[in-house]
Image (cartoon, grey):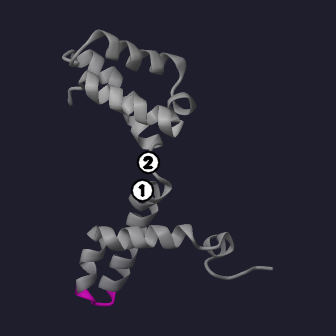
Amino acid sequence: MSIFSRSELILIKQRALRKGAWFRVLNRIERAIISLTIRCVDKVRSSNLAQILRPVVDKLVDAMKSKVKRLTETIGRELALNLSRIAKGWSYDPALAWGSDSGFIQYLAVTHMNTFRTFKNSGGHNHN
């Protein structure tokens, strides 16, 4: 279990306020937990408090990720793994590395982001 320090929590709170996630993502109780922890402790030593803080902090950190970062972690990685499997099935052994190539994964995420919705939903065929 990671231990939170006051300075880490202050930085997370400041960043969340700047990005508008503090009030948008957290409810009143979650905001109070972080604020009171900042006011009351220098370093979280209680495993119970750390267990309460972890999901709240994770929720904030996730909400502050850019759209590209979120898509890279989800869709980009999935696309890279699928393409890797297909190419490997065609006996192209270098394709094994595609599933862990961060540049390729990000490229696929950005390409997906910039693909017209019509093509995403229809597999490239316009059904009009």
Residue 29's tag is none
Rendered residue at 30%/83% (across/down): 88
- At mark 2, the secondary structure is loop
Which residue lies under the disc numbered 1?
A: 69
The stretch of residues the image draws in magenta is: 89-93
Quarter that holds the N terminus: top left
Rendered residue at 41%/29% (across/down): 13
In the image, 113 versus 85, the foreground residue is 113
**Against 63, is 88 above or below?**
below
Q: Residue furthest top?
A: 40
Drawn side of residue 113 relative to residue 117, left or right: left
Residue 13 seen in the current view: yes
Drawn side of residue 31 relative to residue 91, left or right: right
Kind of residue indicated by mark 2? Lys
Which residue lies under the disc numbered 2?
A: 65
The image shows residue 59 at horizontal and vertical percentages of: 43, 35
The image shows residue 40 at horizontal and vertical percentages of: 30, 9
Rendered residue at 64%/76% (across/down): 119
Q: Are marks 2 and 1 in contact (CB under 8 Å)?
A: yes
Kind of residue indicated by mark 1? Lys
